Amino acid sequence: MRVRLSLQQKILLLVTGSMSLMVIASSYLHNGRTRLLIEKDHYDNAVSQTLALGDRIAQFDYFSDIEDIQQEMQLVVSSRPDFKQIDVYEEREGVPQLIATSATGTHDLLAAWDTANPNENSVVTSTQINRDNAAYWLITAGIVNQQHHGFIKALVLKSYHHNLVSNLHREYNLILVGAGTVSVLLLYFLFIYFFRKPVKDIVQTMGQAQGGDLSVRAPVHRDDEFGEIANGFNQMMDDIAARSREREDLLDQIGSLNNDLVRKVNLATTELRAANGNLMRTQQRLSYAERMAAIGQVTASLAHEIGTPLNAIAGHLQLLARNHPSCGDTQRRLVIINSQLASIVQTVKGLLERTHRRTIEPQPTDINAIVEELLLLVDPIFESRKIRVTQHFDKRLPRVLADRESLHQVFLNLVNNSLEAMPEGGEMTFVTNYLAYSGLIEVRFIDSGPGIADDAKEHLFEPMWTTKTSGSGLGLAIAREIILEHGGQIDFVPNVEHGAEFRVVLPVIKAMSETPEAAEVSLDAA
């Protein structure tokens, strides 16, 4: 995770780091220098003490009185704990012999560490040695008088003043760290007073300005760089406030013009959409009426053209039947011809009835009752084809103004289409619902057949268009015309997983008082 530091924190961190390095370096140098100085002073003092002892031995000729030498050495050892051992040697026939020592054992300094015979008059020599994991100086000084000559060896502990050096170093470090800490704290408070407060005021003012308050101004504490920044910021805010007022005035004018334009465009769009809708519906109705009229004319002409020869043929057949009453084969053939003529006549009448429907007579009608009667009528067919029937009727379904026979014709046509789609059996569902929010009722016919191909869905309600080998293509077209005359709508429901679904929507009685255009708009919304 990246740590974000402020400028103040970075400067304080830099100063603290620098001072820490200075403290460490100063402590290291002070410790080393102090140790060297104290060690040198200790060494010089030890040498002086050794020389002084040698001079006293030479001056008072302690070579003749060993007890006096022992007393002098014990006095030095007791007063100077750093003197661990003192040995006095006398030259006898060129060979140094130990005559006195401060050690309790047989630790001969000459035999142990210094095999050379330091026969140098009044010359001090020293050697640094290690003994028992400690550093020592082995100091040698000559002893000369008129009667005797020899030398003295002193074993002095080098690190005798180690505790003193450590205490001095610790006190020095404490003083140095304290001084550094005080300096950092002083610098911190100076930052707060001279840097942090002005910056905080400017940042706070910038935040208020960013929040939309263009009247805020940064306080000017002192005539320094931060004072210049605050003055520059205040001048910039004055310019921004002036530009903002100009922009708001311009936006108000643009907004007013835009609102007027939007209202005019919406009004024109609404009028145009309504006009286009009315024009499209009118064109559809006109086209549909023209097709139905053309179909009616063709059907009527066909019926007239076929009817005249059919009547002549029927007359001649009657004459033949009277002229040959005893010929069984002739009578049998005449019966077959008459039955076929009757079938042709019935087909022509059916076409005429479809194209010349009677005027509907709407009455308050219970849709649930019509569907139940239809189910009773076609129930034997359902049983013979092994079709399961499911019904979901809305018991609170209100009545509608409708022509009972016409609706029965529409519903029967939809059922017949479903029966033809399920020759091997299946399932048929009838559903009625009251759409209270729109004042409509709906009747849904759902079958489990193979469904309708995508390329055929947009042509379902066109006259004379059919996918059946024996269909006339007028059933759904006439059904739509009947439903439209009732102020309703019939549609094919897309996106059904299995089979096909048709939906018939009719207005309830209280909604029939609306104008045709209003009824069509509510149907489209549904």
Image (cartoon, rainbow, N blue to C red):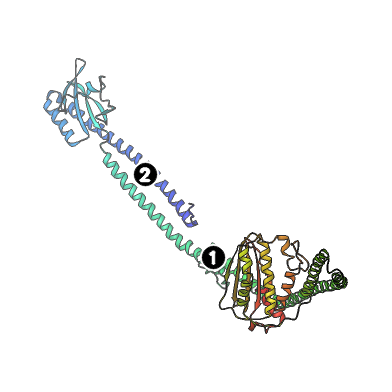
Secondary structure at numbered mark 1: helix
Quadrant in which residue 96 is drawn: top left
Residue 325 rendering spot, x and y as whole percentages: 83, 69
- Residue sitting at the far top: 93
Residue 204 is left or right of residue 378, and the answer is left
Q: Quadrant of the C terminus?
A: bottom right
Q: Position of residue 376 (x, y in %)?
A: 61, 72
Where residue 201 appears, as percent x and y from the top left, is: 50, 66
Q: Amino acid at mark 1?
A: Gly
Callout 2, which amino acid? Ser
Q: Contact, CB < 8 Å: mark 1 with mark 2?
A: no
Circle number at residue 27: 2
User: Mark 2 or mark 1, which is nearer the start of the sequence?
Assistant: 2
Q: Position of residue 365 (x, y in %)?
A: 64, 81
- Nearest the eye: 40 or 506: 506
Q: With 499 as the anchor, is 287 left or right in this view?
A: right
Q: Which mark is residue 227?
A: 1
- Secondary structure category for the residue under label 2: helix
Neighbor class of circle 2 (other Cα within 10 Å; few <14, some 14-19, many 20+) is some
